[in-house]
Image: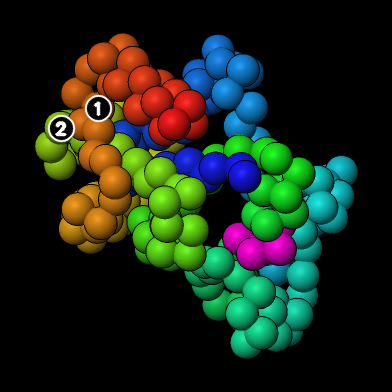
Amino acid sequence: MGKLIIISAPSGTGKSTLISRLLSEHPELRLRFSVSATSRAPRGQEQHGVEYYFFSPEEFRAGIERGDFLEYEEVYPGRYYGTLRSEVDRRIAEGDRVIFDVDCVGGVNIKEAYGAEALSLFIQPPSLEELRRRLVGRQTDSAEVIEERLAKAELELSYAQRFDRVLVNDDLERCYQEFYETIRSFLSA
């Protein structure tokens, strides 16, 4: 049976860096990303079932009504993103180990659906002040967007205790080693 790794964190905590490094340095873990669904139109050369599963807003809402999604979010009016239950079940049936980079609510929902077959990790910044410093240092967002991200981070931090493990990213190398060891141990159990 395939196992699931759920990673959630506020923006700016280093989650994407940790996941990218894990996937590039440890192919032996056989982790695969779940292909998400969206109600936005494909961009450029994107293909249905490759980058995303593309649905119209009406099709997405019908899928929500049928219970097709493990988790979903309406990011903007009529613009949905979510995880198809059938996609995860297919990957598990094929023996894959699935890794998710999802928001906190999605992470909690996936963990509830799969229980002991899933490990949920929450990556936490050392403080909101440090998170602010990191977001400003990226130089990718306006001051307004940074304030929105920080407000969202406060809410997201309230979910930390609902995850199996909380890792504080106060030192990237130490956090990465703990991240890798926690996942490796879970997958080998």
| Residue 187 placement, left or right of 65 | left
- Measure how far apart labels 1 and 2 are at the Cα level: 6 Å
Q: Quadrant of residue 180?
A: top left
Q: Main secondary structure of the magenta part?
A: helix
Crowdedness of circle 2 by 10 Å Cα count: few (<14), some, many (20+)?
some
Q: Residue at x 77, y 70 (%)?
A: 55
Q: What residue sits 44% from the left and 24% below the top?
A: 184
Q: Specify whether residue 59 is painted magenta.
A: no
Of callouts 1 and 2, the N-terminal one: 2
- Residue 158 appears at what percent x and percent y? 19, 58
Find residue 56 and report its horizontal and vertical position in percent.
77, 75
Q: Position of residue 33 (x, y in %)?
A: 63, 40
Q: Which residue is mark 2?
A: 126
Q: Is residue 64 above or below residue 154?
A: below
Q: SS of the residue at dot 1?
A: loop
Task: Name the residue carrying label 1.
Answer: 169
